[in-house]
Image: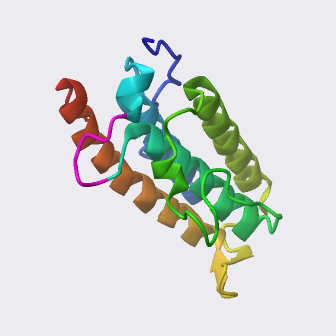
Amino acid sequence: MLRRMTVPERITPPQVADERATLSAYLDYQRGTLEMKCSGLTDEQLRTRGVPPSSLSLLGLVRHLTDVERSWFGRCFARRQVRPLYSGETDNIDGDFDDLAFPDVTHVFGTYREACEESRRIVAGAGSLDDLGVRGNGSDVTLRWIMLHMLEEYARHNGHADFLRERIDGVTGE
């Protein structure tokens, strides 16, 4: 089935803004880039592991980044009991990339967007970028660090998405 999902507008980050607004805008730009790279593809194309022997696929990247959003902002920073949706913590740690045969693609993207929206609410509700969260290893980490880490995570995976998309249908882009 051809994916005709509505892709949120990808807004260029402001050149002059405070630190939180700048980090938030760049993170939203990276989120929009991921969705742009997935737009217009069939469910099967989104599931395609286009760069063997890697198990990466565009749908797997969306699932992975859903769990990453929930983990860093929900579990680490907001200190909520958040479990991975797509992979086990000890068994099948790559379930987000591996178990792609049957997930409903529309549901996967809806869950991704909900996770991003919840992350935005968490960031907006924080008193300061210096507020602390706790990593899984027990070490403290600032909201600033989490946001910068998320930018790195998206930039890396959007690079993967470039290669996957080009391999699937030849589309290249920014």
| Towards the viewer: 142 or 118 | 118
User: In the image, is residue 49 part of the stretch drawn in magenta?
Assistant: yes
Q: Is residue 14 left or right of residue 145?
A: left
Which color scheme did the rendering employ for the protein?
A: rainbow
| Towards the viewer: 157 or 174 | 157
The residue at the point 70 percent across, 37 percent down is 114
Q: Quadrant of residue 153?
A: bottom left
How many circles with numbers are drawn on the protein?
0
Residue 106: give x, y in percent of width and height: 59, 24
Q: Is residue 156 left or right of residue 173?
A: right
Residue 56: give x, y in percent of width and height: 35, 49
Q: Does the rendering let one see residue 22?
A: no
Quadrant into which the N terminus falls: top left
| Towards the viewer: 24 or 42 | 42
Question: What secondary structure is the magenta-colored segment mainly?
Answer: loop
User: In the image, is residue 129 part of the stretch drawn in magenta?
Assistant: no
Please tell me whether residue 128 is drawn above or below residue 55 in the rendered image. below
The residue at the point 82 percent across, 64 percent down is 80
Quadrant into which the C terminus falls: top left
Q: Which residues are magenta?
A: 48-54
Q: Is residue 149 left or right of residue 167?
A: right
Residue 44: give x, y in percent of width and height: 39, 25
| Towards the viewer: 38 or 15 | 38
